[in-house]
Amino acid sequence: MLAAYITHTDCQKHEMGSNHPECPERLGAVNDQLLIKGLLDYMEQLDAPLATQEQLAKAHSPSYLQEFAEIAQQVPENAHVQIDPDTSINEFSYQAALRAAGAAVLASNLVASGQAPVAFCNIRPPGHHAERSNAGGFCFFNNVAVGIRHAMSHHGIDRIALIDFDVHHGNGSEDILFDDPRVLMCSIFEKNLYPFCGDVPMGSNMINVGLPTRSGGEAFRQAVNEVWIPALEKFQPEMIFISAGFDGHREDDMGNLALVEADYEWVTKQIVQIAQRYSHGRIVSCLEGGYDLSSLGRSAAAHVRVLIGAD
Ligand SMILES: [Zn+2]
């Protein structure tokens, strides 16, 4: 059984204007490093399907889904419609967002059913800032939340951990999942950074750790060891989803946690060990942030190498 690698060329057609950091080239940067490092030899590449409205409705409100579809269908050719000060859509964005959420659903199906041991989704737009009824922070559909809810409703999985190591707090995932006792969400993020929340968790199933600017790898690893691991051991997840953002890298201007590839490799090892102990090794990882193309590619490769057991 090969690990699944899920992506789609439609995800590169969505763009938010020249010089926007959440750019189409991000997917190529990740893909190139996976290819150069020989990791794609160990993975089966699959095209992301389109998420259905029924799948999206497990994480988003019907009114939001309808409103977003209507706005997206009215975008003129070669134009952008602004959703928030940092987030806009072009004529291809809706299709890209459906592919990104659809990738998480396919990954959820493959891993939950045992057809693939793990899956990595190289997708954009990212998802973890998308709330139940709001887009924002470059995100439209909350890909991991859609995948998690699909694993629950279609595969009867009752305990799922969501691990988010993006430099920004996954406020959208928290908004969708905070009152769902079947989920434990573990988030480490940089304090006083967008979306400027997370210090006070919305629910008892939220394990949020805000780290000060320039904390570095040692503080990050300490938080994982002292806060995440005990919570995960107590929760004993049947399956794990990862919001894999690499914008905490020291070369990425979007955040200042000063992490390096070795930190992403290390945290992935800890997650794999938990998955092997409690979750039959089942992990679905979805790309979130990471905007410096070189460190994004290198960090994603370090993460995937451990995820698929090629280390
Ligand atoms: Zn981020």
Image: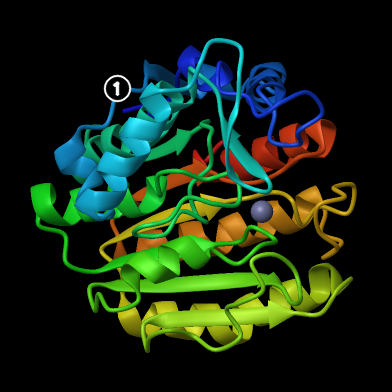
Residue 107 sits in which quadrant? top left
Q: Pinpoint residue 115: horizontal percent, then vertical percent.
A: 23, 32
Residue situated in front as seen by the camera: 46 or 62: 62
As drawn, 232 above or below 2 = below
The answer, for residue 250, to whether it is visible in the render is: yes
Q: Pinpoint residue 63: horizontal percent, then vertical percent.
A: 24, 51
Residue drawn at x 29%, y 24% is 50
For label 1, the residue is: 49
Q: Pinpoint residue 218: horizontal percent, then vertical percent.
A: 81, 74
Residue drawn at x 53%, y 78% is 228
Q: Secondary structure at mark 1?
A: loop
Pick the quarter of the image with the C terminus. Answer: top right
Q: In the picture provided, is 249 more to the left or to the right than 274?
A: right
The answer, for residue 113, to whether it is visible in the render is: no
Mark 1 sits near ligand 1, with its Cβ under 8 Å away: no
Residue situated in front as seen by the camera: 15 or 213: 15
Q: Pinpoint residue 102: horizontal percent, then vertical percent.
A: 31, 32
As drawn, 6 above or below 177 = above
Residue situated in front as seen by the camera: 195 or 227: 195
Residue 306 sits in which quadrant? top right
As drawn, 11 above or below 202 = above
Q: Amino acid at mark 1?
A: Pro
Q: Residues within 10 Å of mark 1 (few under 14, many from 20)?
A: some
Q: In the picture provided, is 189 more to the left or to the right than 45?
A: right
Residue drawn at x 78%, y 78% is 219
As drawn, 271 above or below 154 = below
